[in-house]
Amino acid sequence: MDKLTYLAQLNLLVRSVEVDLGITEVSSSEKAILSAVSLLLKANSPEVSVQQLLEHELVADIPKPTVYRALKSLVDTGLLEKVRFGRYSVANPLASVQFNSNI
């Protein structure tokens, strides 16, 4: 399989997971933040600080104002929870999404 075909198949897989999660209408910045939160939660604690997000490789190139707007939007739409000042976690409905293992 050539690299371009492999990339195309990965894009189809990502799109399928986005549909499963119900995040197809979420901006690319918001998707990057959701991904970073998920990865950071797996590695550390049940909540993530804004500073951790800003330093994460998936978010580091996103301007700070965009990160803060995206966090607000993700909380407003119920995808993230603001646990306390400057700390976030994945919202319960999103955390419990089941994936099809045949993808």
Image (cartoon, rainbow, N blue to C red):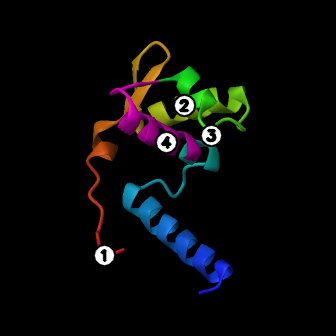
Mark-to-mark CA distance, 1 and 3? 29 Å
| In magenta stretch: residue 33 | yes
> Around disc 1, counting alpha carbons within 10 Å, would you say few (fewer than 14), some (14 to 19), or many (20 or more)?
few
Mark-to-mark CA distance, 4 and 3? 13 Å
Contact between labelled residues 1 and 2, with CB atoms less than 8 Å apart: no
Q: Nearer the viewer, mark 4 or mark 2?
A: 4
The mark that comes first in sequence, 4 or 1, is: 4
> What segment carries the magenta color?
32-48
Please say if 46 is above or below 36. Answer: above
Tell me where residue 12 appears, x and y as whole percent. 52, 73
Mark-to-mark CA distance, 2 and 1? 32 Å
Q: Label 2, on which residue?
A: 71
Closer to the camera in the image, 66 or 99: 99
Mark-to-mark CA distance, 4 and 1? 23 Å
Q: Label 1, on which residue?
A: 102
Name the quadrant of the N terminus.
bottom right
Going by the image, does 53 lie left or right of 21? Answer: right
The mark that comes first in sequence, 4 or 3, is: 4
The mark that comes first in sequence, 4 or 2, is: 4
For residue 34, the mark is 4
Name the quadrant of the C terminus.
bottom left
Going by the image, does 28 lie left or right of 72? Answer: right
Tell me where residue 25 appears, x and y as whole percent. 54, 54
Does dot 1 land on a helix, a strand or a loop? loop
Tell me where residue 74 appears, x and y as whole percent. 49, 36
Does dot 4 land on a helix, a strand or a loop? helix
* Residue lying at 50% horizontally and 65% vertically, measured from the top left: 14
The mark that comes first in sequence, 2 or 3, is: 3
